[in-house]
Amino acid sequence: MNHDVIIALDFPSAQDVYAFLDRFQDEKPFVKIGMELFYAEGPEIVRQIKARGHKIFLDLKLHDIPNTVKSAMRVLSRLDVDMVNLHAAGTIDMMRAALEGLTREDGTRPLLLAVTQLTSTSEERMQKELLISASMPDTVKHYAQNALQAGLDGVVCSPLEAALVKEACGPNFATVTPGIRFADSAADDQSRVMTPEKARLGGSDYIVVGRPITKAADPVAAYRRCVKEFVG
């Protein structure tokens, strides 16, 4: 399994994104387009960033009835992205429908990932507010196994649970882990975090890094530091 650092482009506009990406003269980092940017700029922002030579993780976290998700994935399959995702809580039927919609007529498709539990969700909140009585590790493991059963390529999970997912679903089942912070960074609104080096040792295949890079005084240097710590 490849290892890579994905930069979360959590910016409000295309202008901000292009100004940020223009700082990278020697690299074409893997990037993540989330809800804020996609809803502000629409599919054209995906096309423009792809034209610049970047791999793209389109992070929209679909969660709806199976037929609706299938139809939405069919639309997203027309964009030349490399990863898309949905919520594992939508059930195995929804994930299977998504996979069917995402697969093009020639059999190609982006990687499809299931979000287990958001890294901003603590076990206490999960149990008290979502009424999921199982522990966080057991919930993540079960959701990952459901995703595997549905035919997905991997999950988005906390780096704290990457090793557990690998053990339950096998070494080729991808783990994409947000909640990454440098040892000298603030945790912000994340409650389950890990450094790039520890994430690599813990079984993460891809790490998603936002503010420690995008808000750094020198984003390019911060990105290179992250790559060095995670990829080696």
Image: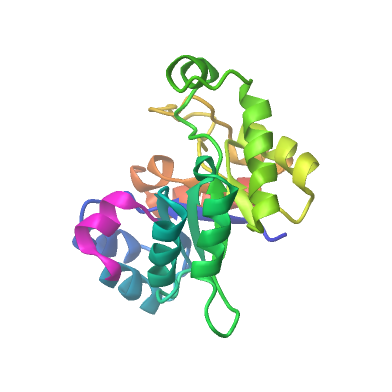
Taking 231 as reference, is 76 above or below it?
Answer: below
Frontmost residue, 200 versus 116: 116
The reply to whether residue 69 is in sight is yes
Taking 97 as reference, is 160 above or below it?
Answer: above
Q: Position of residue 64 (x, y in %)?
A: 40, 49
Frontmost residue, 54 versus 35: 35
Q: Residue at x 58, y 78 (%)?
A: 108
Q: Residue at x 63, y 20 (%)?
A: 135
Frontmost residue, 158 versus 84: 84
Q: Where the N terminus falls, by quadrant?
A: bottom right
Query: Residue 42 lies in magenta, yes or no?
Result: yes
Give the colour scheme of this rendering.
rainbow
Q: Main secondary structure of the magenta part?
A: helix
Taking 162 as reference, is 11 above or below it?
Answer: below
Q: Position of residue 200 (x, y in %)?
A: 68, 44
Residue bounds of the magenta highlight: 33-43
Query: Residue 85 lies in magenta, yes or no?
Result: no
Res 33 → quadrant = bottom left
